[in-house]
Image (spheres, helix red, strand yellow):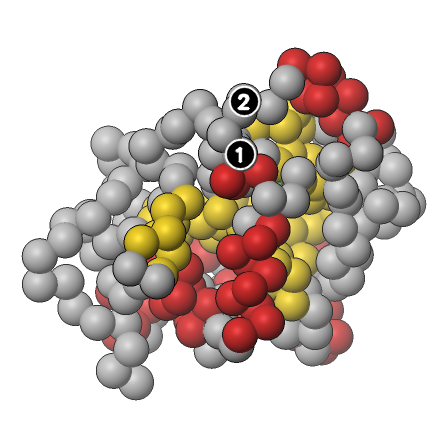
Amino acid sequence: MDEVERYLFDLHGYLIIPDVLSPAEVAELNRLIDAQNLPDPGEVSSAARFNNFLNWDKAFCALLDHPRLMPLLKTILGDGFRLDHYYGIYMRAGTDRLNLHGGGTPYDPPEYFHFRNGEMYNGLTVVSWNLTDTGPEYGGFCAIPGSHKSNYPCPAEVKEQHTDHPAVVVPSAPAGSLVIFTEALTHGTAPWTAEHQRRSLLYKYSPGQQSWSSTHIQPPTDVELTPRQKLLFEKPYFHARPTLFDE
Ligand SMILES: O=C(O)CCC(=O)C(=O)O
């Protein structure tokens, strides 16, 4: 993670890196999703999710520890982080917003942003791979930049106005971009208005000692993982956790 990326992630609580995936890689991932013949996305966010895609092809597993991603996660989460859970988001014109959630206050123990000893410490952290363009003209990820450090709760009025409030941004993130954000950020989803389908793959990572739920994610059964990818499925614990950075 370079100095500018680190500065912007600390400042805003999210970072967008375009062109991490080539057009050919994006096309292949979209082809693999098409081959699943998923039902059309629904109107509400719960009907605009798909699961289990790590079992569909190793191309999805390759994103788990993509070389452009790993140094970012090392700075944000420290070594030994784990895949906590994952899902895909797909949206069609008319799929509704997801309300704003998260924020520095009230404090939510698994979703934190701290700064100590000259380093940041983050709880649950989301990596979203965009397979189609998102942004102000389409919809998709939205956030209040800097809200991971807020000392007051997000007012109901701001939450209600959602993307109509000037504090809420819908950043442009073209297909092939990697969007990374701390769950401590106040964020949500802008309603989808574009002709094209939204397709984002969300991989959620936790620090090694932490788990969002009582059940821990298992590796895919249908795809063989590399040794480093397997380490991302280690159960949560702290002491003597293996490094992810030997390679
Ligand atoms: O639309 C997005 O990328 C944000 C999704 C989100 O916040 C969630 O699924 O909890």
**Residue sitting at x 41%, y 45%:** 113
Query: Label 1's element?
Result: loop
**Residue sitting at x 39%, y 66%:** 75
Q: Amino acid at mark 1?
A: Ser
Left or right of 225? Residue 60 is right
Q: Specify the farthest residue to the bottom.
A: 247
State the mark number for residue 95. Answer: none
User: Where does residue 107 sit, x and y in percent of width and height?
Assistant: 39, 28
Q: Is residue 117 depicted above or below 72 in this figure? A: above
Mark-to-mark CA distance, 1 and 2: 7 Å
User: Where does residue 246 sit, x and y in percent of width and height?
Assistant: 25, 82
User: Where does residue 142 sit, x and y in percent of width and height?
Assistant: 70, 40
Q: Nearer the viewer, residue 154 or 71?
A: 154
User: Where does residue 121 sit, x and y in percent of width and height?
Assistant: 35, 52
The residue pinned by badge 1 equals 150
Q: Nearer the viewer, residue 91 or 238?
A: 238
**Residue sitting at x 55%, y 64%:** 7
The residue pinned by badge 2 equals 153
Q: Are marks 1 and 2 in contact (CB under 8 Å)?
A: yes
Residue 162: quadrant of the picture: top right
The answer to whether one can see residue 108 in this image is: yes
Residue 188: quadrant of the picture: top right
Query: Label 2's element?
Result: loop
The answer to whether one can see residue 47 in this image is: no
Q: Nearer the viewer, residue 16 or 201?
A: 16
Left or right of 67? Residue 45 is right
